[in-house]
Image: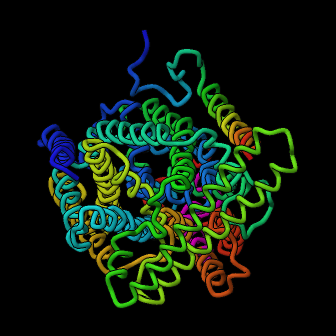
Amino acid sequence: MNLLDWLVLIGSIVGIAAYGTWRTRRTNSLNTYLKGNHNTGWMTIGLSVMATQASTITYLSLPGQAYENGIAFIQNYFGLPLALILVCAVFLPIYRKLGVYTAYEYLGRRFDAKTRLLGATLFLLQRGLQAGITIYAPAIILSTVLGWRLDLTILFTGLMVIVYTVTGGSAAVNLTQRWQMAVIFGGMVTALVVLLTKLPDGALSIAGALGKLTAVDFTPDLRQRYTFWSGLFGGFFLSLSYFGTDQTQVQRYIGGAALREGRLGLMFNAVFKIPMQFCIVMLGALLFVFYQFEPNTPVFFNQTQWLHQKAGPEGGRLQAIEEKHRLILADKRLKIQAWMAARQGTEPSVEASSKTAMLAAQRASDAVRKEARDTLRAIDPKAKTKDSDYVFITFILTQLPHGVIGLLIAVMFASALSSKAGELNALGTTSTIDIWRHFRPLAAQDEARNVHNAKWFTALWGCFAIGFALFVSFAENLIEALNIVASIFYPALLGVFVVAFFLKKVGGSAVFSAALASQTLVLVLFFTGKIYPAHEIGYLWLNPIGCATCVVFSLIFQAFIGHSDDSEKAPIGSSV
Amino acid sequence: MKPPSALRSPDDPPDVPGFRTWRGIYQFVFAFFVLCVLALVVIERLFA
């Protein structure tokens, strides 16, 4: 990074934060702080929902995921448009009609106080853990990029987000997300254009032949993580949870000027999410092609860690692996070129044999990368050997022109800022409305005190996220870690909402017990899979299983318990 | 004269050119999703 990069980086970040803070400097109403400005239009809502969904992990981890495993991850989003249609048609009108601050307030009105508390607790638990992951990701990557200590970047990012969120609230988040999205798109398009100029002819064919463009897999195998079926069904339930029951999302669209604005904002996401994610995974697949022809392709992309170990007593082993990788890569490059030449010819057998040779070279290349990871782990058992999150950042720092590097680093900060702000804001809101106000009902009318408490809770959750990020490390790919945490805690919560909306005869006690039972089942399934990997099912399937069992258990328990209505208000329309 | 947008009921038209009802918008979103999946299958077959 040179002076120009630093100027662009600091200018973008300070500009975004200052604008949001200045525009919302007099936010003192609970309604505005928690729900955002009621004049918010559909485009702002749509971008806000998209920005809250797409964190820094999306822009860094997703290309790396595609680099490693191809674009099959796109199937994860197949259920999303269908889920958003259901949220628009059912969930949103009810939230708007009741004028609730949080989604869990609805559970209190429909069922009872304990179900509302359970819903809020599941959300807080799940989002609190996710906040620790989302803050950890940009911090560890930026520490590598900028050479700063990891704990310092975690503190720097975390404190900046706390100040930004606490001083502005939802309105600030919404206002600046429009600009953050502009920066993000500008940066991503620039990176894509630069990458395209550096690719060889037939790049897509090379990616396809090496298995990176396998997008849709119709195999009906529950153990496979990403298939058309797991994406459609598991992804549908996961998206329904994210957009229909997660306060970070609900808060974005209940704050609109009218029902129409929220609906159009969500439909905007339903249309653009898959194409947007497709562009990001394609970027990863094309990065893979680019690195087949780049002479200095690293064997391990987390170069800070690699170089640190290489300077140590075991450096000779790593140097030998580097040399081996260089030779294998050169051989693979020749095999790819031979296959490309054979495709121009008329002899199918020549093409087939050259393709076989190219695939064998690819396997050799994968093997040497695995050897590098295993060696790093042998040298330092605590080493993070998942380097796919570092692929895109390596490209940015080594291939893009100065100025653009600063812009893209700014994109990551902006994305982290908006995602974290949305998360912390929702955590603060839910803690105030669903937990604190429940135990202090007399304080409900004191708006200034509510805002004051919401800000304190927001700061508290920010500190929790910083603490979690400082003391916990993750074995999974970061983008998958987020979805796995969601798939563990969301299904029971979604089941409660499904019962609330569609099964009006089921009461609070039945659904409460059912949610606990289905949550236990999901935990048992998940940990059984970890202990006995042969029986592990793809995590997306936990979503329909958990939701369905919650609904079925509710009906069974209701038949035994009988109806007892102790809802916080008169029963509300569950027939929609 | 149209009522203010905040006072409209869920069944009010979406005020989007080309769409008279919300059902029409949902159908468009669904059709677009099917198109996306088909496009992905085509891309995969084309470059496999």
Direction from residue A375 to residue A341 in the image, left or right: right
Q: Out of A325 and A82, give the one closest to the viewer.
A: A325
Residue A389 in sight: yes
How many circles with numbers are drawn on the protein? 0
Direction from residue A179 to residue B19 in the image, left or right: right
Q: Position of residue A303 (x, y in %)?
A: 37, 69
Q: Residue at x 60, y 38 (%)?
A: A201
Magenta-highlighted residues: A490-518
Is residue A221 covered in magenta? no
Is residue A514 covered in magenta? yes
Q: Residue at x 68, y 86 (%)?
A: A532
Q: Residue at x 70, y 45 (%)?
A: A340
> Which image quarter is the C terminus of chain A in?
top right
Q: What main secondary structure does the magenta stretch of the protein show?
A: helix
Q: Out of A20 and A200, give the one closest to the viewer.
A: A200
Q: Position of residue A306 (x, y in %)?
A: 39, 75
> How does the figure colour the protein chain or chains?
rainbow
Q: Position of residue A159 (x, y in %)?
A: 19, 63
Direction from residue A211 to residue A19 in the image, left or right: left
Q: Quadrant of residue A186?
A: top left
Direction from residue B27 to residue A171 in the image, left or right: left
Q: Quadrant of residue A450?
A: bottom left
Q: Quadrant of residue A181?
A: top left
Q: Single out the residue that lies furthest toward the top.
A: B1
Q: Residue at x 39, y 54 (%)?
A: A55
Q: Out of B25 and A340, give the one closest to the viewer.
A: A340
Q: Position of residue A354 (x, y in %)?
A: 77, 54
Residue A27 in sight: no
